[in-house]
Image (spheres, rainbow, N blue to C red):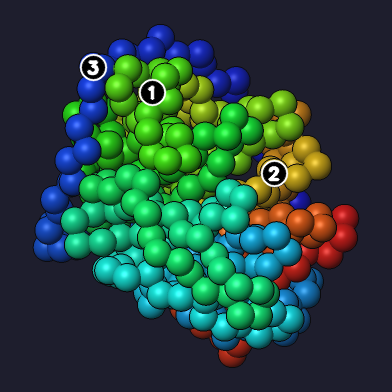
Amino acid sequence: MTVSRRVPPRRVPSRRVAPKTVSRAVAAVSVTALAVLTACSPVGSGSHEPDEGSADPITTGLDAPWSITFLDDTPLISARDTGQILELTGDSTRVVGTVEGVEAGGESGLLGLEVDGDELYVYSTAHDGNRIQRFTVDGQPGSLSLGEPETVIDGLPSAVYHSGGRIAFGPDGMLYATVGDAGIPEDAQNPDSLAGKILRLTPEGGIPEDNPFEDSPVYSYGHRNPQGIAWSEDGTMFASEFGADTWDELNVIEPGANYGWPDVEGIGGDDRFVDPVQQWTPDESSPSGIEIADGTIYIANLRGERLFTVPVADPTTSEELLSGEYGRLRDVARTPDGQLWVLTNNTDGRGSPADGDDRVLRLPDGA
């Protein structure tokens, strides 16, 4: 099925300047309060028939996988609820190591992975909030092990809903991280909270001198729950974002810009904020990980159970792949040899797992 869309051009913002210092306070949100909030992606339809799908299975039987990355040619996968990092060898997995102190619950746990050289960066939830750690990875493929962790940043806002979790290195060599609003929408506009922000850090966790706000890791703000970041060949940064009840978003991220949440959801036409370049209803989207390959943005969708393809040259339009074939899709990644892999997410407590879930899939050539 092909869906063609076009949205009005996004408005260039008049930036709302934040104070120069942003604290790293943890957003304290009770489970009771969160229970009344709108979940990002309710239980799926469970109608998928994975044995009849159009993608090729790479491995099956994963438990709540969240992110996939590559250490040289070896795929590494995070398991949200167990805190385990898995390596994929052939069609089987083995545990590389367990990240200590992971406290899983709802949308929190072991989340994003990213590799820089021979170091593995890991985004996870601890007792005092979200954190990013880095590990050396020792050994050879098939017998890899984790070294001791080094904290890059900690005390990030976390909650059972809207916990962000994606990390990626940009073309500038800096580490970017998405932080959800942790169930407190107003904190996305609060300069004294890191909630509802995209952060930019040095690989060691320092604040780059050219960040848009002095002495602050904040790169952009006014986000609800961004879970995907990627860059096109010309350096343009794109981010996917969960909305509430009305619109999910694809945004072009600009340093220091305000994306409007909770004052605006979707295209608001308010000159104080940057509008998304494209929006979808949560029923058809609920976007998580994204990848850019050969001029196309690939967006994995949970509730929508499909993979959107968006041309970088015209990000106001989209088509879709895998619609309803494999259930919830959490991440999409390009392999070192140029294949596109998709990670399903039907065992995360909101899907209806089929036999063999969850799985890694390979898109056919030319998809």
Drawn side of residue 221 relative to residue 266, left or right: left
Lower sequence index among marks 3 and 2: 3
Q: Position of residue 304 (x, y in %)?
A: 55, 59
Q: Nearer the viewer, residue 281 or 223?
A: 223
Seen at 38% across and 69% down, the residue is 99
- Quadrant placement of the N terminus: bottom right
Q: Nearer the viewer, residue 192 or 364?
A: 192
Which is more foreground, mark 2 or mark 1?
2
Q: Which residue is mark 1?
A: 258
76 vs 264: above or below:
below
Q: Position of residue 249 (x, y in %)?
A: 50, 39
Which is more foreground, mark 3 or mark 1?
3
Helix, strand or loop under label 2: strand
Q: Which residue is mark 2?
A: 292
- Amino acid type of the residue tagged 3 in the rendering: Pro
Name, please, the residue furthest toward the top: 14
- Quadrant placement of the C terminus: bottom right
Q: Which residue is mark 3?
A: 19
Which is more foreground, mark 3 or mark 2?
3
Q: Quadrant of residue 190?
A: top left
Seen at 42% across and 19% down, the residue is 209
Q: Quadrant of residue 355?
A: bottom right
Label 3 – label 1 distance at C-alpha: 13 Å
Label 2 – label 1 distance at C-alpha: 23 Å
- Amino acid type of the residue tagged 2 in the rendering: Ile
Label 3 – label 2 distance at C-alpha: 33 Å
Q: Position of residue 276 (x, y in %)?
A: 52, 30
